[in-house]
Amino acid sequence: MSQTSDLLSQAGGILRNAAEPGWDAIASRVVNAVRRTPRAGGWPLLADGPDLPGSGHLFVSENVLRSTLAVTLRQRYLCLPTAIDLDVEDGALRGVHVDVTGSYGTELRRLADGIRATTVEVVAELLGTTATDHHPIDITITDVVTGDPLQS
């Protein structure tokens, strides 16, 4: 190897091993955002369907449920859903947990109650009315920001 290629190789190695300035401050947010990124497909959730002989089963992807719920919540409330976790057992929805960033001055209990009701509505629309019967829907307000959480 020439002296120039040795120097470039050494510089490349140093740069690959050096942490980006400020990375420590944003690492957890970046990792969480990557984890929330929709995956191709997603797990199938069994939806209520007609009990007709030979009618088969209807499944809805968990990604469809998550994205529909997130869009609906952002449209109806001054909030930012930061995580939507589904408790699924054998293809059946057993519970939903929504983490939300709210806006300063919002009555948080009313916001959580509205989000819970909307979650029941969206789940019933996509999976059927029995999907959330007797299963918990938990809402956690994880942060409060000044102004619109979507702009923060």
Image (spheres, rainbow, N blue to C red):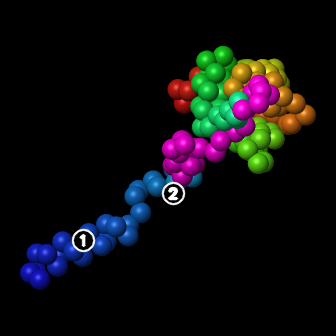
**Measured along the vertical axis of the image, is residue 140 above or below residue 73?**
below
**Measured along the vertical axis of the image, is residue 10 above or below residue 146?**
below
Q: Residues within 10 Å of mark 1 (few under 14, many from 20)?
A: few
Q: Amino acid at mark 2?
A: Asp
Q: Amino acid at mark 1?
A: Ala
Image coordinates of residue 93 in percent, x first then y, are 77, 39
Residue 31 painted magenta: yes
Numbered label attached to residue 64: none
Query: Which residue is label 1 attached to?
Result: 11
Q: Image quadrant of residue 127? A: top right
**Where does the N terminus fall, quadrant-wise?**
bottom left
Residue 79 shows up from this direction: no
Residue 29 painted magenta: no
Total labels: the figure holds 2
The earlier-in-sequence mark between 1 and 2 is 1
**Measured along the vertical axis of the image, is residue 114 above or below residue 140?**
above
Q: Residue at x 22, y 74 (%)?
A: 9
Image coordinates of residue 148 in percent, x first then y, are 59, 22
Residue located farthest toward the front when viewing the structure as drawn: 53
Q: Left or right of 140: which side holds 1?
A: left
What's drawn in magenta, residue-wise? 30-54
Kindly state the secondary structure of the residue where label 1 is placed. helix
Image coordinates of residue 85 in percent, x first then y, are 70, 42
Kindly state the secondary structure of the residue where label 2 is placed. helix
Query: Which residue is label 2 attached to?
Result: 24
**Where does the C terminus fall, quadrant-wise?**
top right
Q: Image quadrant of residue 96? A: top right
Residue located farthest toward the bottom when viewing the structure as drawn: 1
Residue located farthest toward the top when viewing the structure as drawn: 76
Q: Residue at x 78, y 48 (%)?
A: 89
Given residues 53 and 17, the one toward you in this image is 53
Q: Residue at x 31, y 71 (%)?
A: 14
